[in-house]
Image (cartoon, rainbow, N blue to C red):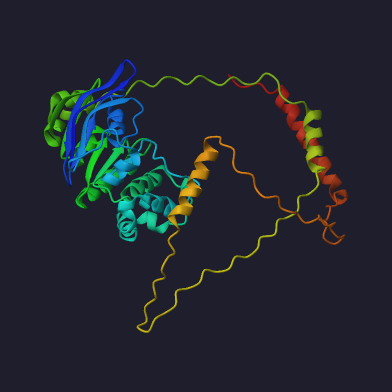
Amino acid sequence: MLEVRNLSVSYGKHRALGGASLRVGKGEIVVILGANGAGKSTLLKAVCGICEGYVAGDVQLENAQLVGEKPHKIVEAGIALVPEGRGVFGDLTVEENLTLGAYAERARDEAAGNLQRVLSLFPKLGERRKQTVRTMSGGEQQMVAIGRAMMSNPSILALDEPSLGLSPLLCKDLFESLRVVKQAGLGILLVEQNAKQSLRIADRGYLLENGNIVHEDDAERLANDPAVQKAYLGGSGAATGARRPAPAATPTPAIPRPATGPKPNEIAAAAMKSVGAPARPVPVIKPTAPAPKPAPVANGTAAVQKLDTPDISDLVAKASATASRRNGATPPPRAPTTQPAPTQPTRSAQPAIPDFASSSDRLRSMIEDIEAAARRAETYKPRR
């Protein structure tokens, strides 16, 4: 399906990628392994049309040439990218982020079916359709990013470091989800530093060093290759199962005791100041109306309510406004609104001022205790 031949990328005089060639078939996971700075992300950006350098070579999907095409044209051709760092719209809900993924022409007619497929693949997203994405964990946001890419109805799903910043447990769940995505018939081009987990689910792999692909093989053979184990899987100990010795623990230096502290009269003055502050009014919490229950049907089962899908054009405008605010653009001026004149609160509506006269003896006793404790702290000497 995807054929990359002699793909090169240059940033001025610096050559970041030199003559890379690879292929990804239908229902196949292909992983690209390499150290930091080897050119893995540059390769994905060049394939997806978002590379800022000079790109040369051939990228073909179903015999369609993609080098030189605009990014949205490449999405229409059938390649969707999950960028490093997820790139979700944090101020929008889960459902709105997923709906934005169906903006491409090839995906609009099948938006409902793709949404059900994504929610069945990630059930947690179905439970949190109305939740704002920025309030979710990193693993859940990664699910949103993958689901949004799948909403474009792609043939090839490209992922750039999807496990970055996730806990080991969430990484395991993520790779299992990619295995299920593969079973749906999508080709997956995966850039990942977690070589051990990625080789377990991949079919084939490529080794990228200094912008050049130096080796290609079956994923199982790559995992058992001593050179690959030494470079990417933690050395010979990963192959033999031997554990590395734990580093010696360094003693933690003792924290020095402060030489001076607040004086008793300063502590007493701070206590008097805090007691004399006016009491805050208690906020009134309005009760919320209970959610409506689904109406029963004749056979005794609850009727499934049809959820309203937001309009894609409105979501694009909302996402653009959010991105403009994030980039520092000046928002459009708002129409002036008239504020109602403030009303003077009545005598009964004002908060009652607490009477501290009856508790003066208790306050005096508390201040004396504070002063005594402060004097003891000044003369305290730690035992040696």
Splitting the image into 4 quarters, where does residue 172 fall? top left
Pinpoint residue 269: horizontal percent, then vertical percent. Answer: 81, 33
Relative to residue 340, is residue 265 depicted above or below? above
As rendered, which of 41 and 180 lies closer to the eye? 41
Residue at the image point whose x is 32% and y is 40% from the top: 81
Residue 147 visible here: yes
Residue visible at 49% across and 49% down in the picture: 317
Front-most of residues 76 and 310? 76
Q: Is 343 on the left or on the right of 68, as rendered?
A: right
Instruction: Give the quarter of the image for residue 297.
Output: bottom left
Please tell me which residue lies in front, 33 or 72: 72
Q: Is residue 78 visible?
A: no
* Residue 86 against residue 316 in the figure, above or below: above
Q: Total label count?
A: 0
Quadrant (top left, top right, bottom left, bottom right) of the N terminus:
top left
Residue at image x 34%, y 42%? 72
**Which residue is located at x 58 percent, y 68 percent?**
289
**Is the residue 356 above or below the residue 47 in the image?**
below
Q: Quadrant of the C terminus?
A: top right
**Residue 160 horizontal side relative to residue 24, left or right:** right
Coordinates of residue 332 in the picture (x, y in percent): 60, 43
Q: Which image quadrant for residue 114?
A: bottom left
The spot of residue 56 in percent (x, y) is: 25, 26
- Residue sticking out furthest to the top: 13
